[in-house]
Amino acid sequence: MKWYIKNLVTTDFLTYFDDIGEKYPDDYNLLYHKAQLLEGLERYDEALDVRCHAMEIAGIMSYYATNALGNLYYRMGDFYNAMVCYEENAATYKDNSLRLCIADCYLALEEYGSMEQMLADYLAEGGEETEATSYRMMAAYMKEDYEELLTYADMLIAENSRDAKAKAYKVVAMRALDMDGTEELIREIDSQGF
């Protein structure tokens, strides 16, 4: 029933956007929200068409349009085009936080050396060490390097003793390394309400 109601409401919104769009075909805000709705429905090809049209008319809002397009490419699994968008904004607007988006793309592509270089650039521009460590922890997990995974998880837990994600990765590493104490750590995570 929830799906039916959500689908009905969403269809009504799309109809609304189409009706208003006939009157205002170049309204960036309208296009932005229509693309967001289409993305939420996982209708990525349609969302991409709308986003590209928005990019054509964005002008001063190009930073937001480019980021939104990068996010759409990321959701579609097109990490190279997502990086192009993020890199353009990172260079043009000197937005250091976008280096994390680029690092995330490299992580998804399993290009760990490029990810590490992007994290180094992020840190050199004043980025937070915990953010970089979190990416390194995920890379260690993907590479199945459980000793490295344990090291990064411990670093994050030392920074924030309530970091449930780091504790979960620590459990994975401890089990893979056949270490004692995993059940105790799981109870600790459970007792924190995670």
Image (cartoon, rainbow, N blue to C red):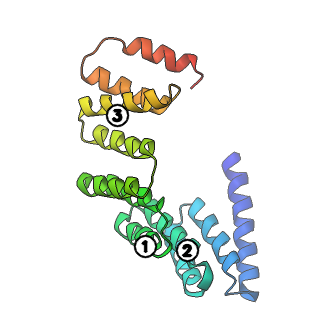
Residue sitting at x 49%, y 72%: 45
| Quarter occupied by residue 148 | top left
Residue occupied by mark 3: 152
Residue sitting at x 38%, y 41%: 133
Residue neighbourhood size for the residue with mark 3, other residues' Cα within 10 Å, grouped as few (<14), some (14–19), many (≥20): many
Residue 134 horizontal side relative to residue 140, left or right: right
Residue 147 position (above or below residue 16):
above
Which circle, 2 or 1, is nearer the viewer? 1
Residue occupied by mark 1: 91
Earlier residue among tags 3 and 2: 2
Residue occupied by mark 2: 63
Q: How many marks?
A: 3
Which amino acid is tagged 1?
Answer: Ala
Task: Choose between 66 and 4: the one closer to the eye.
Answer: 66
Earlier residue among tags 3 and 1: 1
Q: Secondary structure at mark 3?
A: helix
Residue 140 horizontal side relative to residue 160, left or right: left
Earlier residue among tags 2 and 1: 2
| Res. 115 mark | none
